[in-house]
Amino acid sequence: MIRLLVRHEWHVLTSHAVVQLVVFVFVSALLAATLLGVARDVRERATALVFSTSGEIGRGGRPPSLRADAVANERGSLALLPPAPLGALAIGQSDVYSNYFKITARSLDGLVTGDQIEHPLQVASGQFDVAFVILFLYPLLIFAVSFDLTASERDRGTLRMVLSQPVRLREVVAGRMIVRVVLLLVPALVVPLVAGLIAARVEPSYVERALAWSLAVAVYAAVWHGIALIVNAGGRSAPANALVLAGIWLLLVVVGPSTVNLLIGTWYPMPSRVDAAVQARSATQEASVQGSRELGQFLQDHPTSGNVGQEGMRQFALLQAQRDQRVADRLQSVEAAFNDQLARQQRLTSRLSVLSPTMIAQGVLLDVAGTSTHRFEHFRFEAAAFQREWRAYFEPRVLDAATLTPEEYARAPVFTYQDEGTGAMRGRILAPIATLTVLALLLWWAGFRRYEGYQL
Amino acid sequence: MIEAADLCKSFGSNKAVDHVSWLIQPGEVFCLLGANGAGKTTTINMFLNFIQPTSGEARIGGLNVAAHPVETKKKLSYIPEMVTLYPTLSGLENLRFFTRLAQASVDSDVELITILEQVGLTADQARRRVGEYSKGMRQKVGIAITIAKGASALLLDEPTSGLDPKASNDFSELLTTLSVRGVAILMATHDLFRAKESGTRVGIMKHGRLVESIDTKRLGHSDLEQIYLRHMHD
Amino acid sequence: MRDAFTIAVKDATETWRDGRFRSAAGLLILLIIAAVAGGVHNQSEIARQHRDAQRAERDVWLEKGDMNPHAAAHYGAFVFKPVQPLSAIDPGLDPFVGVFVFLEAHKQQLARHRPIEDATPTRRLGQLTPASVALVLLPLLIVSLTFSSFAGEREHGTLRPLMAMGISRRSLLTGKALGAMLPLVAIIVPAVVIGAVFVWTNAPADPEAPVAARAVAMLAVYLAHALIWVGLGLAVSARARTQGTALIVLLALWFLNAFVAPPLAMATAKWIDPSPSAIEFAASIQDEKDSWPTWDARVEDLTTRFLDGEFASTMAPSNVEVTALLESEADETALYNRRFDALFAQYARQAHTFERIGTLAPTLAARSLSMAFAGTDEAHDRQFSAAASAYRTQMLTTLNGELAAYGQFNTFDYTRGRDLWEKVPPFDYEVPSAAWALSSRAWSAIVLAGWLVTVSIAAAWSVVSMKVGP
């Protein structure tokens, strides 16, 4: 019976011009977003290839000076974050955070963030990626094909014709829901993954992430279909349904998240970087000035570097290291306090994100794609660990004002990025996906319940 | 076959159907007359399980409709006042869909076209989109569904309203054919002429109650009109 | 004209009696209040932080004690981006650009710390601002007011009798337009009053700051944008076969303008003129640096040139290294200037393309203008960067100049004190005028005006040629 209803509904639904238009728009948007994303991803991978083999920012050029200080600090090393596994699908935060650090042995500059130079207008305008199409457009299109589940047929009398046959209303509704879900979910899943497969190299974590992505999209869609089901079960006319659904979309996708963000920004603002910068300045001022004075004194005693000699260079290196350490120590407490407060505010705001399925789904999609804040934080953590390794290797030689031997240079540490593994991702997305699943099940159950009282 | 057993339906304090009872045997054509709002459509809706009775039972073939909605619907067929089908599908496609929904054994296109021809639609007309059909043609599809389904009970709501005299006549003939085959027929109508022509019994409903139930054989045409108007006058 | 007024009053009354409109209008006003209050609160808080920080920084600068002027140049100075009062209405790019710049010798730097870096990812879903209410939500309300103006009456069959009474099409159009605008006034007037009051109480004390002119300009932009949507709604309603078609078309146009146009426009701009990635940019700078002579080679070369008598009158023997330092710094500064100028030029070209694409989307043009007048667009950010850069040059010239002037008697042990630090004036940023803002976005202004004219003509033509019966 369901098969008959599904086949019939498929035939009838796809004959509507509006539905054909909706599918066309959806597929076009998905294709455009995927192509843009894949092009960007291919370019990023090519760049990463160039730099990950060299291990440094410069791309060759003159042979390096082997002075320990030059190698450790001027030349430094490069910590590069490999492109995100599903970065073609969601740009996420990769236009805000940098994907590389220059590593030096000086405790002051140790981890120098490469400025993310993405055009601010681009960051402000948002990206036309697959995540955007799924999060914003997909729900609207679901509503566009679902505002007339039974309303017009009820008003015209066709529904009575159907229900005078030995078939239950819930079977009819179920069949219609199945058709609508399949109609849009198949392009939503197939287009990006197939196109992504063609362009990207398949990595070990790719399959698991692709499955997680598909699950997240399916569950997100199920929530919106459930909302449509409940509204249709209310018995209003088709235009009235359309108005209600449009209002719900507006509230949950547009107004809701942006108002929540306003409230968060006003009542739980992030700690001020500006204040922190001023605090850091005054905290380090004394140490910095004193250090400069000592260095200045040293240079006064040694007018030209040519007269300094090895012992003098060692003294200079030591003075510089001491100054850096003093300043870094003062900085550390200011930074620690700031980072604590920041983490607390961010945890709070994450909790508030359960207010809209769009906010929940966004977090999951970004995490799965590998462009959420988590991955960048993990990268920073790894880079900091590498910086300590780099510093430990070079510091004795720098303080010694030595020149490296070729073997010492060759044995210098090289950064290899260790992804945190899909286990961590799984742990993080479990709760949000479960929330969306429960929500979807509740909505569908409530919708079918409501349909039992449907006035013919 | 079509049995109302002390059927009642109230909407709040309003008694839409008030202790209605009848038994329509196979082959009988029971015409239900009454003003708008007398309760005819509400009664029919209870036989279709579109609404639940407040008390009493609606039975098809001895089975309580409310308790066995699916089984009873296998036995009955329904033609509303406006037969609305799927306009983008052809008459044949619509028939096929409804027949399959009805889980009828008749399935092949040949059989379905034969039935459509029986009710007066040519094979050519059958393949045209229902959106282009006249009311009479759509009604014929409705009757075709009844035949294809092999229903033993037929419920009709104002079938001849809006039909021209020829179509109305065609309809009467089809009705007679069905009753000869043993289908029990309940027809709610305003059409006193058709009621006398096609009906074996006539029931008059007023304010939810069945106030009169007469054998048409014992009636002349003018008699029926007089009786009807007398009740309406009260 | 009287006919038009009658129609307008009738339509407006119907709308006002519709409970759904009242709730939508009420919600919109609530959102405006929230957006304005939140915007003003945040803006004044950030402005206070920046002002305090700039003052604290000045104290730090003056009180750093005695040190070598070159060391002072390395000690550097922070400048904090002044926050425009109208950014409360349209924060524009402020959360996405750096808030302070560290000025020092050797290298130019990009402004640091973009607030978006500290926000959680959900922040990328957008933030409610008065500008977004005006440019995104208000058009939606306008669509709901206008989609059935003609199509609805035609479907209900009330249009034909109306025309049969001898009402001219022009009166009909005027009446319908007024009928849609009257309920809007009930929303726009309170909104403007609320906005004005909030902004007025937070305007800076500086009377020279061109807040009033900019505020009026922003209001004009929002009103023009609203009028464009009124015209669009009426034109589509007149042409559409059914109400449903009109609604779908208008909703699609709204969605395209509000959500699709900005990212697609930017993607196109980047496609045409791709900017380098962060690491490619850094690499290009590093590569060039790698090609320069080493410090030792520089000193050696200078020593040779000195011995050859090149600097006979100006330089003492011990000054070779100072000169080498100054020269290498000049080279590095020039390199960074070149690279950053190229990058900013590319940004400007991309913003230019973005603006050009905005020709097709009036909301995009309105947005560009709104940001420009609020002082939060990319052009204003570049103004700030340029001002910071000029200040840096001034600072370095003052400091290094002292070094060069007196340096022939001393090298790195030469120290100065507060008297020199005071020669560098405090950082003072002058906000450009409203006229400058307009000139930087002249194209968008022309586009908006063009759309207004086009839509009016389209609406008139649609009404003149529309079908009266269903």
Image (cartoon, coloured by chain):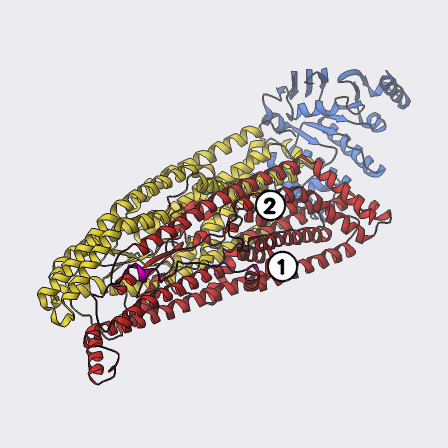
Chain colours: A yellow, B blue, C red
Quick check: C299 left or right of B88?
A: left
Can you give x and y, in whole percent of width and height, for residue A191 in the image?
46, 54
In the shown orientation, is residue A256 left or right of residue C223?
left
Give the main secondary structure, helix, strand or loop, of the magenta stretch: loop
Residue at position x 88%, y 22% in the image: B225
Residue C125, magenta (yes or no): no
Q: Which residue is mark 1?
A: C448
| x and y percentages locating residue A284 in the rendered image | 26, 51
Q: Which of the two residues, C94 or B212, is positioned nearer the viewer here?
A: C94
Q: Amino acid at mark 2?
A: Leu
Q: Which mark is residue A13?
A: 2
Q: Residue furthest front?
A: C419
Looking at this rendering, what residue extends furthest in the bottom direction?
C308
How far across and how far down the image is residue A249, in percent? 55, 42
Mark 1 and mark 2 in contact (Cβ < 8 Å)?
A: no
- Would you place residue A7 above or below residue B217 in this image? below
Crowding at mark 2 (Cα within 10 Å: few <14, some 14-19, many 20+)? some
Residue C177 or residue A401, whichever sits in front: A401
Element at label 1: helix
Q: Residues within 10 Å of mark 1 (few under 14, many from 20)?
A: many
Task: Give the image quarter of residue B196.
Answer: top right
Rounded to the nearest angstrom, the CA distance separating label 2 from label 1 is 40 Å
In magenta, the rendered stretch is C415-434
The answer to whether C175 appears left or right of A89 in the picture is right
Residue C5 visible at all? yes
Pair 2/1: label in front: 1
Residue C428 covered by magenta stretch: yes
Give coordinates of residue B149: x percent, y percent.
Answer: 65, 33
Asked which secondary structure carries label 2, the reply is helix
Looking at the rendered structure, the kind of residue marked 1 is: Leu
